[in-house]
Amino acid sequence: MTMDSSRPRIRKALLITIALTVGLGVVVAPQAGTERAFAVAVQYQWPAGKDPDCSDSNHRFGIDYSGHFHTGDDWGYCGLDPSKEIAIADGVISETQENFHGPVGSRWCGNRVTIAHADGKYTTYCHMNSISKFSGTVARGERIGVPGGTNGTDTPYGTHVHISIASTLGNASNPIFGTPTGYNAEGQAYSPNLTNPAEWIRAHLGSVAPPPASRDIVKIWGDPAIPAWVTTDTGLDSNEDAYTSAVWMSGTNATLMIAENGALERVAHTTSGWVKDDTGVSLTGEISAVNMGGGTNPWVYVNTPNGNVYEIKHTTTGWTKHKLPNVSGVDHISAVNVGSATPVIMATSVTGELSEISYTPGDTWRQLSTGLVGYKRLSSIYVGGQWALTYAQGLSNSSLYEIRGVTGVGWVSNQVPGAASTGSISTTPSAPGVSPDWGQIVLDNSGDLVRVWVESGSWHVASFGVNSYRQMSAVYVSGNWPIVMGYQ
């Protein structure tokens, strides 16, 4: 199933007014063009932890160096972790937009999120590599996406976020307007509804929001004697925004690789219990671990916010990391062992294009398009043949798609009936002898952990009966049910 990604995808809050209490006031998500006036104090924080020393001095609010009008400020990341973009004030998401790149050579918003605040202001965040949250309430300091670089825009500033503040929804969706002849430095001749972000934040600055909550690392497993799903606390914890990837290496437990606070860590079960070790490898981005021959350490692949992919392996001298050549524009990845000396990596771009990354012995890494477009997070397994079997979320919806290679046809996509996901997605092989041509898929759907599988030729979807779990990753060890690792 091929989806058209040539047009921007806009998601708006319900066109009826959505209201919720935030502090002493009410936040609403009205239609574009409306203004709101509330006498409610809202606390803001600097997007990169400090300001505006951390922003690009050449690309502040007002007339920029090129003579164009810049609707907000560009914040770089000054050595801070660029794996997430945060909301700078409490609010409710009023609109998100994907695949918004404009004409070639333009400097448009890319992926963006707009948040309505209780003081009547809207903040818009541009140039995201990907969006993490599409609707609902957000807290100051909460993750809403992953910052990008150019992200389809013609801007030379590298990884950064463009933030605009306005009192009218949709007023500052684009960072750059045409040459504003006669406009003053504040752009008031263009729109009195735009606000200088640095000045506004400084005047309404609250204490910096606390870091993401620490969550327990847990193992969820199926106990056939009950039968029921059982949650076991490993006694370890991690940052709730950290990426995870579970992999079976040996024994009856999974190994969990974690990308946390700019470093790669390994969680494994030993004779003395669960332990968490720092590999000494620095990284930022989504990870995918794969067992390439037993032992105690998997190979790990990471896609960075700028779209590159790195390979991390354990050798006799310790953990090593190197960049894969000829690979770019990657937004999400899933590495899978297909029985060769190196894995195949299935990847999606920010525009939803699905590609296959593989290594040719004696040659180099190659990234080839599957010809399919319209996907974001994905997870792959190997069930035989020459292709990986992939399950992916729709780019413009939460539906689940099965993607497999068919001899003589090529790559084919079909929607999995009744399955949806708004969070993590993980796939494991089915139990031996049970539907070997399909996988078991574990989905996070708005906090509800869901298992999807094929039985007697039909798809089945069932909740684990547990919720409030994040960054879950599943692995097959034995029996009929997968082991799931993640945060509670």
Image: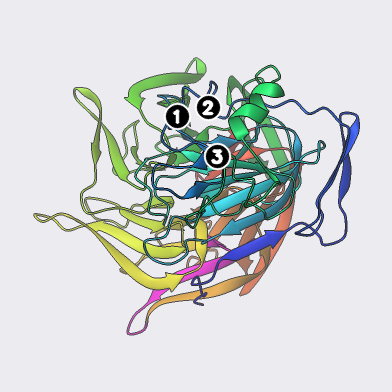
Q: Is residue 284 magenta?
A: no
Q: Main secondary structure of the magenta part?
A: strand
Q: Which residue is mark 3?
A: 185
Tell me whether the residue at label 2 lies in contact with that at label 3, contact meaning CB atoms closer than 8 angstroms.
Answer: no
- Mark with earlier residue (1, 3): 1
Q: Image quarter for residue 295?
A: top left
Magenta region? 392-409
**Do the CB atoms of the residues marked 2 and 1 lie less than 8 Å apart?**
yes
Q: Quadrant of the C terminus?
A: top right
- The furthest residue to the left: 362
Residue positioned most to the front: 182
Question: Residue 125, how many percent across, how many down?
Answer: 58, 44
For mark 3, does the 10 Å Cα neighbourhood hold few (<14), some (14 to 19), or many (20 or more) residues? Answer: some
Label 1 is placed on what type of residue?
Tyr
Q: Nearer the viewer, mark 1 or mark 3?
A: 3
The residue at which mark 2 appears reads as 48
Q: Amino acid at mark 3?
A: Ala
Earlier in the chain: of badge 2 and badge 3, it is 2
Relative to 299, 201 lies left or right = right
Q: Residue at x 67, y 53 (%)?
A: 171
**Which residue in the structure is indicated by mark 1?**
77
Along the line of sight, the residue nearer the viewer: 438 or 54 = 54
Dot 3: what SS? Answer: loop
Q: Nearer the viewer, mark 2 or mark 3?
A: 3
Where residue 113 sits in the image (x, y, percent)? 63, 49
Q: Residue at x 52, y 74 (%)?
A: 3
Inter-mark Cα distance, 2 to 1: 6 Å
